[in-house]
Image (spheres, rainbow, N blue to C red):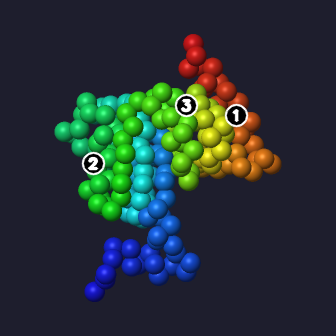
Amino acid sequence: MSDSRYDRLKLIPNWKQEKLANAKIAVVGCGALGNEVLKNLALLGIGNIWVVDYDTIEIHNLTRSVLFRESDIGRHKAEVVTERVKELNPDVQVYPVIGKLELAFGRGLLREMDVVLGCLDSVGARRSLNKRCYFAGVPWIDGGISHSSGNVALFDPRVPETACYRCKMDISAWERLNESKR
């Protein structure tokens, strides 16, 4: 009989469950990708998760977001995923931050994070997150999905030789940014 929900994970060579239990991670964006990321962080036993999103759940979110239910329509995404992550794993501490990143998640708190996971669908929001993480000295991982593809990129301001998000933007990203400003 197993002593812990993490016994299988501990079979992985060099696995450090204590490190995960003490980790501080912010997930910015609770849509489709954010749902999947949060589900996986909960199952891994990440100890402290801050969930940042200002949006509310709409019916179209239900086809791609595993943590949302029809009864959640109209509620804040950050609030709902916080409840569902706790249901998945009561060991995890989850803190909802309802609001825009720039206003609701201060730089002091950002500096405490081990890593920030960007699950955003806006180029402008990604640029803002990049700037905030850069000045806080915190690495962040950008994730994005579209109809038939996805991307993941690490941006670490502690490694000066690496490019930032803005420096790596392609023509398509610049076009989407300019369209959003019209």
Tell me the residue at 31%/81% (across/down).
3
Q: Hey, which quadrant is residue 125 in on the image? A: top right
Sooner in the amino-acid sequence: mark 3 or mark 1:
3
State the residue lying farthest toward the top: 182
Q: Is residue 153 visible?
A: no
The correct choice, above or below, for 124 with respect to 159 in the image is above
Q: Which residue is mark 2?
A: 83
Inspect the image, locate mark 2, and give the three-letter code of the amino acid beneath it: Glu
Q: Which residue is mark 3?
A: 125
State the residue lying farthest toward the left: 71
Q: Position of residue 100 (x, y in %)?
A: 45, 29
Neighbour tally class for label 1: few under 14, some 14-19, many 20 plus, Cα within 10 Å? some
92 or 180, nearer to the observer: 92
Inspect the image, locate mark 3, and give the three-letter code of the amino acid beneath it: Ala
Q: Which residue is mark 1?
A: 166
Neighbour tally class for label 3: few under 14, some 14-19, many 20 plus, Cα within 10 Å? some
Sooner in the amino-acid sequence: mark 2 or mark 1:
2
Inspect the image, locate mark 1, and give the three-letter code of the amino acid beneath it: Arg
Quarter of the figure that contains the C terminus:
top right
Distance from Cα at disc 2 to Cα at disc 3: 25 Å
Image mark count:
3
Distance from Cα at disc 3 to Cα at disc 1: 11 Å
The correct choice, above or below, for 174 with respect to 52 in the image is above
Neighbour tally class for label 2: few under 14, some 14-19, many 20 plus, Cα within 10 Å? some
Distance from Cα at disc 2 to Cα at disc 1: 34 Å
Q: Is residue 83 visible?
A: yes
- The numbered mark at residue 8 is none
Q: Position of residue 178 (x, y in %)?
A: 63, 20
Sooner in the amino-acid sequence: mark 2 or mark 3:
2
The correct choice, above or below, for 148 with respect to 8 in the image is above
Q: Secondary structure at mark 3?
A: helix
